[in-house]
């Protein structure tokens, strides 16, 4: 059952690729406004505070990972990939919000991936967690073949977005997944599995 769950989760993750790629390509048509970054951070933090009040408080790992996501997006992606098109600040703000919300939702599915992997080999992960063996857990989490397939898919799907933005290079989207989405998702998985030494039955 866990393997079937893992495959189902991967299909869900796959279905989330196109909206992210399309949105990145569309956003890259327009200018980057660095003076608005601070306001976006303030808004994002307020939104997370509201969610915490209305729902189960967001795990600290999500807060940490989302901070890194925002840093990558505003420091590494936008400054080097944005075009010269003009848009009202409010429109740009909502484009950024849409992208980051989609990416955050995708990364948070890392918890589901980690649960499925834990259920496959619970004793192994309890042992590694008890030893705080981060290196070996990361090794267990890394599937180079799956990651390569993701990057190849992202490259091909980006090429198909040429009608949205002919100047948006496939490598820009590939880098976003390779250097941001995949490693940050893995951070979420790692944090979950490091806590699994405390799981008595099943998983949280």
Image (tube, rainbow, N blue to C red):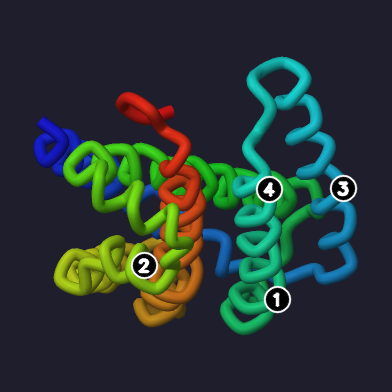
Q: How crowded is mark 2: few (under 14 residues within 10 Å), some or many (20 or more)?
A: some
Residue wearing tag 1: 75
SS type, badge 1: helix
**Whole-number angstrom distance, CA of label 4 to CA of label 3:** 13 Å
Mark 2 and mark 1: Cα distance apart in space: 26 Å
Dot 1 alpha-carbon crowd within 10 angstroms: few under 14, some 14 to 19, many 20 or more: few
Could you say which quadrant of the image residue 89 lies in? Answer: bottom right
As drawn, the label of residue 138 is 2
**Mark 4 vs mark 2: which is more N-terminal?**
4
Select label 2 or label 1 by which is in front: 2
Q: Which of marks 3 and 1 is nearer the N terminus?
A: 3
Measured along the vertical axis of the image, is residue 112 above or below residue 174? above
Residue under label 4:
63
Task: Specify whether residue 22 is in view.
Answer: no
Considering the numbered disc 2 on the image, is that residue within a helix, a strand or a loop? helix
Question: Could you give the CA–CA distance between mark 4 and mark 1, rounded to whole angstroms?
Answer: 18 Å
Labels 3 & 2 near each other (Cβ < 8 A): no
């Amino acid at each position: 059952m866990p393997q079937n769950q893992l495959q189902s989760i991967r299909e869900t993750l796959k279905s989330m690729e196109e909206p992210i790629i399309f949105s990145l390509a569309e956003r890259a048509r327009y200018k980057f406004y660095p003076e608005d970054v601070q306001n976006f951070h303030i808004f994002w933090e307020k939104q997370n505070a509201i969610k915490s009040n209305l729902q189960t408080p967001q795990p600290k790992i999500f807060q940490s990972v989302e901070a890194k996501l925002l840093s990558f997006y505003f420091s590494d992606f936008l400054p080097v990939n944005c075009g010269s098109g003009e848009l009202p600040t409010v429109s740009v703000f909502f484009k950024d919000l849409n992208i980051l919300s989609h990416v955050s939702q995708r990364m948070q599915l890392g918890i589901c991936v980690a649960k499925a992997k834990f259920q496959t080999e619970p004793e192994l992960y309890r042992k590694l967690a008890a030893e705080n063996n981060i290196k070996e857990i990361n090794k267990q989490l890394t599937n180079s073949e799956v990651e390569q397939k993701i990057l190849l898919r992202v490259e091909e799907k980006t090429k198909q977005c040429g009608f949205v933005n002919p100047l948006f290079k496939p490598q820009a989207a590939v880098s976003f997944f390779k250097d941001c989405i995949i490693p940050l998702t893995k951070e979420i998985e790692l944090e979950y599995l490091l806590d699994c030494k405390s799981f008595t039955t099943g998983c949280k």
